[in-house]
Image: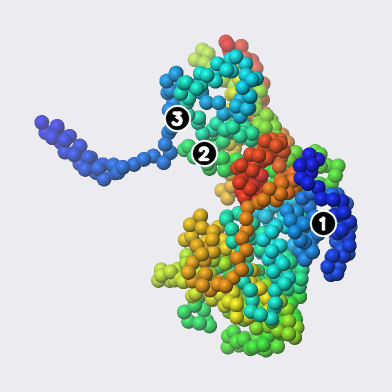
Amino acid sequence: MASTSGLRTTLSKMAASLTGLLKPWTPRVLLVRWSRYNPYYLEPEPRKEVYHIPETELTPEQKEERELKSVRPIKAATNSVTSSVFNDPVLSKFVNMMMKDGDKIIAKGIITQTLENMKRKQVEKYHKAPEGKKAEIECNPYAIFHQALENCKPVIGLASIQKGGKFYQVPIPLTDNRRRFLAMKWMITECRDNKHRRTLMYEKLSQELLAAFSKEGNVVKRKHELHKMAESNRAYAHYRWW
Amino acid sequence: FLHYSLSIALPPLSYLVAQVRPLHGSGCGQQQEAVGMEMRPETFSIFRTQENDPDCQSEQHQGQYYTVPPSHFHTVFPHGLPPRYQQQVKTFNEGCVMVRQPALELISHLKRADYSKPTLRYLLYGVKGSGKTMSLCHTVHYCSTQGWLVLHIPDAHLWVKNCKELLPSSYHASRFDQPIQASNWLRNFRTTNENFLSKIKLRQRYVWTKRESTEEGQPLGELVDMGVSRVKSSSDVVGAVLKELRLQAGGTEGGFRLAVAVDGVNGLWGRTTLKKEDKSPVAPEELTLVHNLRKMINNDWCGGAVIATLSQTGSLYAPSSAYLPQELLGEEGFDSMDPFIPVPVSLYSEKEFESCYLYYLDRHWLQHPHSQTEEGKKELIFLSNRNPSVLERLCAFL
């Protein structure tokens, strides 16, 4: 009996302290799109071209689809979906990977500052370069970003496979998604870890991307090291069974 | 590139010929020819004009960019330009300013004003990012090329906030001095008006300490040098400089015209974020710099003009949607500035937007492949609503 009364007093004490904390609270970001929709709901169509096709040029499937959309409910579009011509899926993925605690505004801000910084450096170089050298300087920050990411993608990866009580690092092929993920992850961790306290993230990121574009820098070095490890562990390749 | 020029009505080729004839008898034509030889060969571009002298610019140049000569840059604008524009100048390796209607209006008023009457006050106002500071800088360039003495205060808000050192004034018991801001401003003032410093002589004796004083008849340059070196009394030096210029501006013997250009004039009336040692707030009147500047903005002197800009961006305790003079200046400010000539600065018109877009294309600033298409251009118009600063920030990462 003493234990239950003791439990009741502790619970009442907890309740007394918690009532002060339980103020009416609405979260700052309200979720509009649920993750589990009724299969009845259809996907939204963000592309503008689809809506510009005149009535006469629609194929029978498209006409059917339009009639279906007029009766069925449609899922809410997520924040990352745009009909903008400047939308880049690879860049969106990079922004999501850089995001911390769901703060996409800060992550997107850093990326736009990075692109601006890269463009500024390259355009300045372009305007100061003599006529012959101008064609070699790449000024498009998006092209630089994509090329730098390509240069950071590893071709072969390593997996830890257990055989006879020991774990071996076995070289395995990687899917495209995995390669892209590794390149982005290495880029972000490199910029976060090996950065001077006073350098801003966008500055460091632009330096790294420009270095990776010309196949220099720490991220490309890390990729080469992975390739060397895979080469040295060639003997264990037959441990892979898939 | 060609299909853009087709969509805008081309002025006749006689436009090029007309420019060679001397227009105002002030030698604009010859100057323009000399300028033309220094720069790249005259290719006909819809968004650039070869008329680099603000005196000769007129409505026909509206929407076109003129280049500020590199030699003028460091003397005329040591501190006046917006920071993003300074970055742009560094990137593009040239400083181009768009000729817009508010600046042209101001310049035409300045040309026709009577300088024996009390000073006229011009106030540039508009929504955030519409180009008030750039119009002010254009007018300052005009005044500078015409040989006026330019008193350019880049941002009055910098004097009412973030002051690390607030010294009690030696001249007046209840006022406060700001040595760092005053000495910085004096240094920039010296760079802008080198040629006037030896010509203007002081009309009064100024005593700084028991051992230091500046005698009557000394050139202004000595006063300014003293203010820059003796940082403690720099705020009082600023007050003395302003007083001397006010007295001598309208003078008939060796008279010069004085242009007082103040950016963010609404900072002079309002509240400050500075605090005294007992944590009570400092009113703007209690700062020497603000007190002296307010005397300058009064229209009790003649021989010059006061050109001011309102600014919400650096302002304290003002809502972000406020842009009208009544809202930003407050009761006190409006009464002090009244009567003034309001000059509204609007967002880009269609022609100006085209011009800006073509300029960015020419400077290789718009790099995204889609931004160079019609679709991308429509999207830029939609996203920026033709607001100059928003467009600049959008194009920065595209």
Residue type at mark 3? Arg
Q: Is residue B196 visible?
A: yes
Residue A185 position by quadrant: top right
Mark 1 or mark 2, whichever is nearer to me: 1
Name the image quarter holding the N terminus of chain B.
top right
- In this view, which residue lies farthest toward the front? A56
Residue type at mark 2? Lys
- Nearer to the camera, A144 or B290: B290
Say left or right for A151 vs B207. right
**What residue is pinned by disc 1?**
B50
- Element type at mark 2: helix
Mark 3 or mark 1, whichever is nearer to me: 1
Residue type at mark 1? Gln
Q: Is residue B197 visible?
A: no
- Report in which chain the residue with disc 1 lies: B
Q: Residue at x 53, y 73 (%)?
A: B336
Q: Residue at x 69, y 64 (%)?
A: B105
**What residue is pinned by disc 3?**
A33
Q: Is residue A219 above or below residue B95?
A: above
- Element type at mark 1: loop
Say left or right for B114 vs A193. right
**What residue is pinned by disc 2?**
A104
Gap between marks 1 and 2 measured at Cα: 45 Å
- Nearer to the camera, A135 or B17: B17
| Residue B277 placement (x, y as % from top left) | 43, 71
Q: Is residue B1 above or below residue B210?
A: above
| Whether labels 1 and 2 share one chain | no
Q: Quick one: label 2 or label 3, which is nearer the N terminus?
A: 3
| Whether labels 3 and 1 share one chain | no
